[in-house]
Amino acid sequence: MKSSSQIIAIVACVFSLAGNLQAQDNSGMVAVLDVAKVFEENTVFNNRMNAIKTEATNFKAQMETAQTDIQAKAEPLKDLKPGSPEFNALQAQLEQETASLRTKAQQTNTELLSREARIYYDTYQQMQKTVAALATEYNISLIIRFDSQAIDPDKRDEVIKGVNRNVVYQKNLDLTSLVVGKMGSVETANAGGNLNQ
């Protein structure tokens, strides 16, 4: 059982904590941010993503060419007797080449997805720093993610997505343009900087 002095100390601590919380200035504004739009309008993000898409397209073309080559190499199997040493040797070679191609495709796909994730991460980290700086500058206590895209009433998916939005209404609280502009100026200042690819 706790002594009365321990209980008094705990009560004093609770009142002290409550006083500190009340003393804090919680009068900051609330603002909204269209994160998707920030990403869409970020030049460095788009350039890096387009480079990965180009690389993926080129790799896909290489894989298709390699598959066509393997199919061409398989043509002689038709003329060979199944089970013969020549048939078995060619079949084993083709299976090995196919397996190697499949492994290379999986490894490249994993590597491209990892790099893509890193691009999203780097851009999001930069956005967070920009948002934090703006929040401090303009005394904003809370920034809520929202979607500024207009809803097409003829597209069910868009309507459902719109109905489920967290922000139903906001008036002149949108930081999106400020964040896009600040991130652009940071990227310009860091041109040729240290963003990982």
Image (spheres, rainbow, N blue to C red):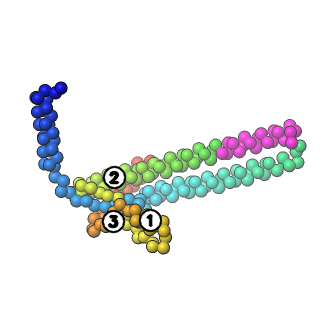
Mark 2 to mark 1: distance in Å?
28 Å
For residue 168, the mark is 3
The residue at which mark 1 appears reads as 160
* Sequence-first disc among 2 and 1: 2
Q: Which span is picked out in magenta? A: 82-102
Asked whether 183 falls inside the magenta stretch, the response is no
Q: Is residue 156 visible?
A: yes
x, y percent for residue 41: 41, 63
Does dot 2 land on a helix, a strand or a loop?
Answer: helix
Residue in the image at 28% along x and 65% along y: 173
| Percent x, y of residue 95 | 74, 42
Q: Nearer the viewer, residue 33 or 158?
A: 158
Q: Amino acid at mark 2?
A: Gln
Q: Are marks 3 and 2 in contact (CB under 8 Å)?
A: no
Q: Please determine whether, in this image, residue 135 is positioned above or below residue 162.
A: above
Q: Secondary structure at mark 3?
A: loop
Identify the image quadrant of residue 9: top left
Q: Is residue 180 visible?
A: no
Left or right relative to 20: residue 174: right
Q: Quadrant of the rendered structure where residue 172 is?
A: bottom left
* Residue lying at 38% horizontally and 62% vertically, measured from the top left: 165
Tell me the element at label 1: helix
Q: Nearer the viewer, mark 3 or mark 2?
A: 3
Q: Residue at x 74, y 51 (%)?
A: 69
The amino acid type, in three-letter code, at marker 1 is: Ile
Quarter placement of the N terminus: top left
Label 2, on which residue?
A: 128
Residue 101 shown in magenta: yes
